[in-house]
Amino acid sequence: MGLKSSFSNLSLECGTDEAGRGCLAGPVTAAAVILPLAFKNSILNDSKLLSEKNRLRLQPIIELEALSYACTHIFPEEIDKINILNASILAMQNSIDQLSVTPEFIIIDGNRFKPYKNVPFQTIVKGDSKYLSIAAASIIAKTHRDAFMTKIHDEFPMYNWKQNKGYPTKEHRAAIKKYGITKYHRKSFRLLPEQLKLEL
């Protein structure tokens, strides 16, 4: 069963999704993508279901063939101020702001969003495995965020972000316990399990 090309059947329907919401370090990153209605791709799917190789294969195809796309990072300082849900929605809305055309309709992965400029919208749970534009947005968000985490890995290699991308792996938590936190860590998150208190 393939992914659907549109929810609204309007030609300027934008899909949006975020990556990195559950991470302990790094930004939450969102993308907005408007695909042509006739867009087809046999491997495009929810980024979580694809190998890194396939995500990196799809990224330039989406960026080339999309009518418009944009990607935005919201960094830990802001996440800590406004909370991760608001930061995720802000990242999506900032990405929509940067599109070269105003969408006629917005479809969002998940169940939470805030009205954007009077543009009608629909939240769709597991939308990234149902609609092409949301799947495309999930891939753009994920590949751009992964590239950022790989870049900052060189600054703080002891956390191995190029591998764990800031997610709460055992290794990442062990490094936080041993080395403390960096400017890239989200202080409002529970960085260590309860029994391992961290002096902030």
Image (cartoon, rainbow, N blue to C red):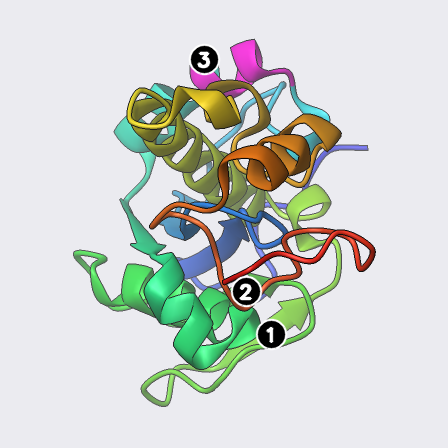
Instruction: Looking at the image, tell me whether mark 2 or mark 1 is earlier in sequence order.
Output: 2
Q: Of helix, strand and loop, which one carries label 3?
A: helix
Asked whether 16 or 155 is in front, the reply is: 155
Q: CA distance from mark 2 to mark 1?
A: 5 Å
Asked whether 144 or 79 is in front, the reply is: 79
Relative to residue 21, is residue 149 depicted above or below? above
Relative to residue 180, is residue 1 depicted above or below? above
Q: Of helix, strand and loop, which one carries label 2?
A: strand
Instruction: Looking at the image, tell me whether mark 3 or mark 1 is earlier in sequence order.
Output: 3
Q: Dot 2: few (<14), some (14–19), or many (≥20) neighbours within 10 Å?
A: many
Disc 3 target residue: 57
- Give the residue at x 64% y 71%: 123
Asked whether 104 or 122 is in front, the reply is: 122
Viewport quadrant of the N terminus: top right
Residue farthest to the left? 100
Disc 2 target residue: 107
Q: Are marks 3 and 2 in contact (CB under 8 Å)?
A: no
170 horizontally vs 148: left or right: right
Instruction: Looking at the image, tell me whether mark 3 or mark 2 is earlier in sequence order.
Output: 3
Q: Position of residue 83 (x, y in %)?
A: 51, 75
Relative to residue 1, is residue 14 depicted above or below? below
